[in-house]
């Protein structure tokens, strides 16, 4: 599986975080809008019905007055029609209340009273319609008036109570919605915060992992790769070589008599020399080469796409540069030299074999007097690409 870099991961996490935050923001806006609209619409409709119903008692009083004052039986028709409409209005309000989510317990006494009024309206309507066409006596008219006024009073009181209850409930509901909205906003903020924190932690974790990986691949003193990393890169290069059949060489380098530097100038100066030598190596090689410190004063350079001849030339350049190197501090007068073993990978070779051959050649270079490059081939190699001869399989001082 391809590893994601810390930067790539951070970019993806930030993108995800931005998306989540936007969705949350949209959800909050949508919720607040819907909640306010919903509550407003329900109560507006119900309160409007009750306000209209509150005119009914006045209409009833007027109809009664006309009915009684004119003593005209035909006016009974107008009163009867009104008495027919009133129960429908009550029924409509009752249905609205039932359908709403209001706690009906507070409304039950009112609804019961309205049901009672409905019955009385029905009785009065029967009385008025039955009497239509007959002669009204004043006693009967007075009775209609009295019963009508009782209904009018009952209706006026009930509607007024209902209106108050609805206004109160509406105010309560709005307050509740306000709190709910706040709670939702708070909750979403917490979610966003939590997601952000988790993402930050993930980014930190990834950074730590990257640092750990870097440290596990790096030599602390010189900043070069270490033995483990060289091994990994070598395995990759061998796999690549099997696919593309390109040359691959290895150079092993060991500083000569390094102990003397430590003994003469002290360990810290020895450390500085090791760092300065690393710089020389890095300066001489290409970007695709892998330079590693194997431990102590021993180094290795893996050279992809490089045959033994080119590797030998490079080794010579490194040897020359090392001799010419001015050592730091009190060691400035000391001349540092390096012995180098070079080898090119053969067909069906392995890194272990390659390394072992380079090591043997390094040993030979040491044994032959140090400050030498041993490549093991009987050929002579031109140095720096120009014509030149090597006395034997080795070159050096
Ligand atoms: N300053 C410093 N010295 C180190 C470090 N690692 C190893 N050394 C020293 O390197 C020296 C290596 O000594 P030897 O193995 O005898 O090798 P040499 O003196 O270079 O001799 P030849 O390799 O035979 O030419 C020892 O004195 C080690 O203490 C390090 O990280 N810093």
Image: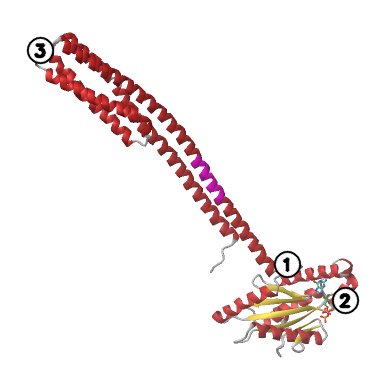
Mark-to-mark CA distance, 1 and 3? 121 Å
Front residue of 330/67: it is: 67
Mark-to-mark CA distance, 2 and 1? 24 Å
Q: Are marks 1 and 3 in contact (CB under 8 Å)?
A: no
Q: Which residue is mark 3?
A: 135
Percent position (x, y) of residue 5? 59, 62
Q: Compared with residue 380, is residue 127 higher up or lower down, i.e. above or below?
A: above
Q: Which residue is mark 1?
A: 223
Q: Which residue is mark 2?
A: 260
Q: Compared with residue 394, is residue 14 higher up or lower down, i.e. above or below?
A: above
Residue that appears at 20% across and 14% down: 143
- Which quadrant would residue 125 be assigned to in this image? top left
Question: Closer to us: mark 1 or mark 3?
Answer: 3
The answer to whether residue 81 shows anywhere in this view is: no
Q: Magenta span covers which residues?
A: 183-194
Residue that appears at 18% across and 18% down: 79
Percent position (x, y) of residue 365? 78, 85
Rendered-image quarter of ligand 1: bottom right
Percent position (x, y) of residue 12? 53, 56
Front residue of 355/256: it is: 355
Q: Earlier in the sequence, mark 1 or mark 3?
A: 3
């Amino acid at each position: 599986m391809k590893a994601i870099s810390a930067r790539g991961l951070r970019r993806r996490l930030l993108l995800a975080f931005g998306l989540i935050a936007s969705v949350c923001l949209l959800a909050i806006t949508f919720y607040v809008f819907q909640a306010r609209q919903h509550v407003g619409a329900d109560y507006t409709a119900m309160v409007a019905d009750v306000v209209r119903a509150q005119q009914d008692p006045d209409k009833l009083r007027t109809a009664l007055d006309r009915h009684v004052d004119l003593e005209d039986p035909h006016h009974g028709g107008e009163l009867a029609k009104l008495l027919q409409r009133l129960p429908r209005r009550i029924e409509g309000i009752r249905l609205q209340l039932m359908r709403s989510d209001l706690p009906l317990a507070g409304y039950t006494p009112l609804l019961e009273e309205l049901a009672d009024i409905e019955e009385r309206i029905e009785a009065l309507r029967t009385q008025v319609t039955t009497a239509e066409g007959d002669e009204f006596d004043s006693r009967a008219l007075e009775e209609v008036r009295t019963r009508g006024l009782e209904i009018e009073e009952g209706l006026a009181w009930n509607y007024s109570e209902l209106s108050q209850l609805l206004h109160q409930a509406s105010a309560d509901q709005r307050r509740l919605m306000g709190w709910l909205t706040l709670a939702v906003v708070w909750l979403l903020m917490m979610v966003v915060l939590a997601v952000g924190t988790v993402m930050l932690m993930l980014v930190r974790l990834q950074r730590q992992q990257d640092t750990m990986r870097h440290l596990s691949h790096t030599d602390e003193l010189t900043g070069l790769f270490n033995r483990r990393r060289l091994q990994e890169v070598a395995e990759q290069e061998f796999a690549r070589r099997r696919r593309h059949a390109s040359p691959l060489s290895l150079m092993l380098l060991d500083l000569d008599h390094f102990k003397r530097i430590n003994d003469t100038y002290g360990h810290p100066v020895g450390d500085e020399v090791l760092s300065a030598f690393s710089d020389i190596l890095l300066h001489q090689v290409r970007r695709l080469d892998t330079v590693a410190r194997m431990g102590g004063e021993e180094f290795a350079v893996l050279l992809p796409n490089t045959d033994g001849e080119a590797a030998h030339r490079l080794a010579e350049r490194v040897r020359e540069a090392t001799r010419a190197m001015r050592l730091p501090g009190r060691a400035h007068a000391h001349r540092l030299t390096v012995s180098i073993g070079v080898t090119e990978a053969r067909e069906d070779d392995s890194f272990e074999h390659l390394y072992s051959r380079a090591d043997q050649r390094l040993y030979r270079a040491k044994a032959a007097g140090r400050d030498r490059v041993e490549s093991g081939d009987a050929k002579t190699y031109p140095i720096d690409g120009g014509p030149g001869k090597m006395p034997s399989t080795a070159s050096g001082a």
